[in-house]
Image (cartoon, grey):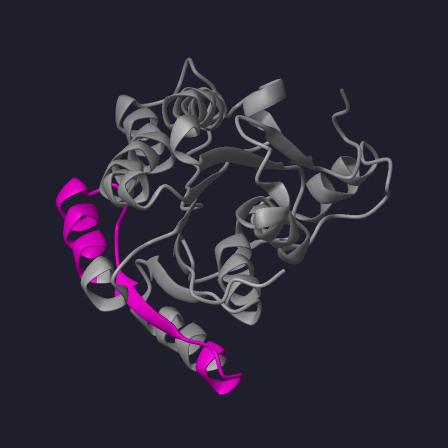
Amino acid sequence: MSFSGRVALVTGASQGIGRACALQLASAGAAVAVAARNQEKLNELVAQIASTGGQAAAFSLDVADEDQVKSTFKAALAHFGKIDILVNNAGITRDQLVMRMKRADWDAVINTNLTSAYVCIQQVIGSMLKQRWGRIINITSIFGQTGQAGQANYASSKAGLIGLTMAMAREVASRNITCNAVAPGFIETAMTTRMGEAFKTEALKMVPLNRIGTPEDVANAVVFLASDAASYITGHVLNVNGGMLMG
């Protein structure tokens, strides 16, 4: 799959799934705008991409801040001239049972995981419509499909991303723009590491393929959906969960 001449923007790109997506898109030939809150990690990522002959630029961004989103996308468009591929990956957790969950924790997760995707899409959709080509890929979660106790805010945000994906797919399909989602299961990231070894041991029992996924497993799905090989796929949720959820 060649992405020569394409420009991708990945949010939450400083680590984990976002970092893997940026690296794989760059290795396939795309110029990549990497955005996240940690500027130091972004600079390291850009240096790594450049060391292999790729093209990338770093943009400090808190996706929960709408003004920052607008200014960052404006800067990325000015730098690269266009954005062909948008990967909405940035996300947080604030886990708690509903009876104890603070409204601030609900709002923070919804704003970061769901509202930010809507705001990011608004920044690129105009240019995608004009050029009649675009790929929007939202990183949701298996818990947006099954729910999870103690994660009502997270599960709601990820379920909302699935609805946003399908609505956008219908809105822009006539202009050769696809919008899809990738739903990871248990993936080895900083977020899952915080859950502890006992939790991961129990989680592994629910995975038919008998391994925890890697960020690269998810990035492979993202790269496929961004490619011309997936030009007839839109409004789809691609499960990357080792068989944990089927059907």
Confirm whether the magenta stretch covers residue 220: no
Q: Viewed as shown, does residue 67 lie left or right of 181? A: left
Residue at the image point whose x is 58% and y is 19% from the top: 147
Q: Viewed as shown, does residue 141 lie left or right of 85? A: right
Q: Is residue 222 above or below residue 80?
A: above
Q: Position of residue 233 (x, y in %)?
A: 59, 33
Q: Quadrant of the N terminus?
A: bottom right
Q: Viewed as shown, does residue 79 lie left or right of 137? A: left
Q: Position of residue 121 (x, y in %)?
A: 31, 38
The answer to which image quadrant residue 101 occupies is top left
* Magenta part of the chain: 49-75
Q: Position of residue 179 (x, y in %)?
A: 47, 33
Q: Is residue 81 above or below residue 71?
A: below
Please tell me which residue lies in front, 21 or 229: 229
Residue at the image point whose x is 52% and y is 62% from the top: 3
**Residue 77 visible in the current orientation:** yes
The answer to which image quadrant residue 168 occupies is top left
Please tell me which residue lies in front, 138 or 205: 138
**Which residue extends farthest bottom?**
51
Q: Position of residue 172 (x, y in %)?
A: 38, 28
Q: Is residue 53 above or below residue 215?
A: below
Confirm whether the magenta stretch covers residue 71: yes
Q: Quadrant of the C terminus?
A: top right
Please tell me which residue lies in front, 71 or 173: 173
Q: How many marks?
A: 0
**Residue 148 visible in the current orientation:** no
